[in-house]
Image: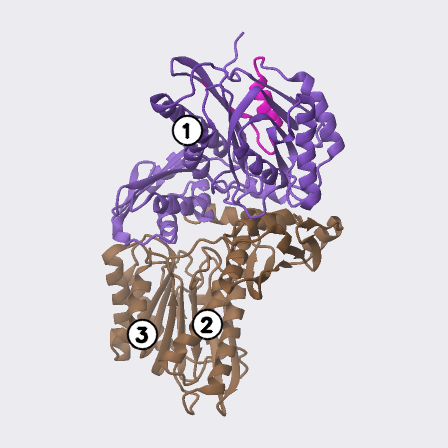
Chain colours: A brown, B purple
Amino acid sequence: MNDSAPLPRGFRAAAVSCGIKRDPTKLDLTLIVSDHAAAAAGVFTQNRVAAAPVQVSRRRVPASIVRAIVVNSGNANACTGDAGLADARQMSQLVAAQLGCPAEAVLVCSTGVIGERLPMTKIEAGIAAALPRLSDAAGTLELAARGIMTTDTVPKLTSRTVELAGRSARISGIAKGAAMIGPNMATMLSFVLTDAAVPHEPLRDALAAAVDCSFNCICVEGHMSTNDTVLLLANGAAGGPTLEGDALSRFRVHLTETCFELAQAIVRDAEGAEHFITINVEGLRSDADARRVAKTVAESPLVKTAIHGADPNWGRFVSAAGYAGVEFDERQLSCWLNGTLLYDHGDPVACDAAALSETLRSHREVTLRLKFELGTARCQFWTCDLTEEYIKLNADYRT
Amino acid sequence: MNDSAPLPRGFRAAAVSCGIKRDPTKLDLTLIVSDHAAAAAGVFTQNRVAAAPVQVSRRRVPASIVRAIVVNSGNANACTGDAGLADARQMSQLVAAQLGCPAEAVLVCSTGVIGERLPMTKIEAGIAAALPRLSDAAGTLELAARGIMTTDTVPKLTSRTVELAGRSARISGIAKGAAMIGPNMATMLSFVLTDAAVPHEPLRDALAAAVDCSFNCICVEGHMSTNDTVLLLANGAAGGPTLEGDALSRFRVHLTETCFELAQAIVRDAEGAEHFITINVEGLRSDADARRVAKTVAESPLVKTAIHGADPNWGRFVSAAGYAGVEFDERQLSCWLNGTLLYDHGDPVACDAAALSETLRSHREVTLRLKFELGTARCQFWTCDLTEEYIKLNADYRT
């Protein structure tokens, strides 16, 4: 049987529709189970207003022995006070009771509308329906990805098989997110599973490094969510020794590529977006400075609307860099759009604006390069344009 | 003769159309002259990519003896390298030659498209045409305000007559700006004139304080301009002693009110905006924290689109506060929209969402209140909603 995106060995998953979303044809609860106790790592939102499931899962991850992740979409269980915290714990308890493990071995996530209580009767029925459907059959990873979607238009999943320490191991991941995307330590929901054997500490380090240059380098509109969570489970079902040395390094590379792919998939599916914009910033004094410039340019509504309007209005790119909080002189800055030099060490460069505008109109992919003369640090960042459709979607989200 | 917004005594102004803007019916050059040497204060953009006129005027203001301000609209003279600096100096030189004063006594400003050279032949003709039209007749302040408009739909001006140290003094101001509004130390162009006698140092302190709680407390989309400039000239033509003590304090209050009025006028005329939003943040540990929270909420596209859509989606307000970089626990936060409590110390409050939505739909004015329990510091901030019209205007700005 052909399955282009299989689950790693020892993992099973299911997704059901339990009535949290209004549309009964939409899946809204995903359950992922590891048959063996898995090592776990997690990166969570830095928002001071953290959703109840974030508060619950954040405390459990360091314990490192995880059996399941239960996720609902359609309701974020955020800003719901003590009652919301009890709901999140109860959600994990319902799964734990069936698996015969402590509630602490079940991680819980939610995504959707903020400020409403979880419909616990529906959640309970959903978990009861999902348990007997747990499977590792072809297509299961995609179902799991569909179960966590909100305004996403496509499921986001990726899977790879790699040789590590003489064994064939798999790394598979899913993600959701199309708005309220503002990078800082983590963004939206993503779950990465591997059957490689990686102990808790190197697993945590590997995830932190991978998230830093992937999920933390994207934005849609820059609003940091209350529910951002990236979880990584490693259950060792591929067999063989725990990874170290070269094998661990190679695992980190593959994990990072997995996160790149999922993070970029979020930006490609950003609400209303018509362009996928890669921002390359180079020549800064520090990585932090490079990221600050890239993020500031990426978040500017004037940059986003210029690209939406196919307007090579480089003054907006350069002026956004100017308020990023990084010290520089404009003579130390040059700027390219889709490979064309527009601003050279502080001076404008004559260009064929009509031709450049035509490349913006006819291509979804846009590359913006900002080169400084201050050092060797760099950052690659991904964002999208800002469109009338984004406004419509977000003005009409609830009402 | 009736003039609701007169110039202060000893000031004359003129505005002409000299062909910088494509539309020949639009004024694009304003000249303001003080018959006596005036004390001057200025606050300029903190953008590292500062326009040529900002670089020129910033150096001249501390010298404090100013005779004129010359301003063009339609071209920002920003990102134009050494040639642009020479153009800005030449623009002031053309005025200085006619007034018989040093070029250093003429301040220069520009606003409009970034990255194009000033059409100096047109500027020269414009200055020559403006000089013989200098006047203090009724309506002149409004003409001056029209001469600095770009995408503004209304001229922004204010004037008041106040008793200071036993003399009747006037404070009059103009401003422009409808986008690329992101507050940090100054924003867009504003010129405030007074015939009160205020020496250079207290004038500078008074302007800094007034700008801090007015122009620095507004945003449209948060993109900090390369050209932001607020200038204040005081020529003492009202007669009487230089202001000090109580009279100076009262001057500061009136100056602040002038700046409030002009700053709010910018937000009321924000591109595409349909709502004027006042954000009251209180109960923080420091003014800086209060401003950080207010600015973060004000800049969130999700907050702006919720209000555009008449959606009392308070989860977006609260979650924006959560990523402002200020430490707090959500139990220390309550939130009101148009006077209705929606979030009480970390718990959602049941409300009539339909009725609240109707107040948003039927009223242009929106008030958002975020109350913390951390201290006594507060901030009042003004912003607008984000609409499809803003996207259209900014996608089509140049092309």
Placement of the N terminus of chain B among the 4 image quadrants: top right
- Residue under disc 2 on the same chain as residue under disc 3: yes
In this rendering, is residue B248 above or below B54?
A: above
Instruction: Name the residue rendered at 37%, 79% in the picture.
Output: A201
Q: Position of residue A231 (x, y in %)?
A: 40, 71
Secondary structure beneath label 2: helix
Q: What chain letter is assigned to the residue under label 3?
A: A
Magenta-highlighted residues? B137-160
Which numbered tag is attached to residue B256?
A: 1
Mark 3 neighbour density, 10 Å: few (under 14) some (14–19) many (20 or more): some
Q: Which residue is mark 2?
A: A209
User: Which circle marks residue A62 in the picture?
Assistant: 3
State whether residue B257 is above or below residue A191.
above
Secondary structure of residue under mark 3:
helix
Helix, strand or loop under label 1: helix
Q: Amino acid at mark 2?
A: Ala
Q: Is residue B254 visible?
A: yes
Residue drawn where x is 75% and y is 52% of the image:
A355
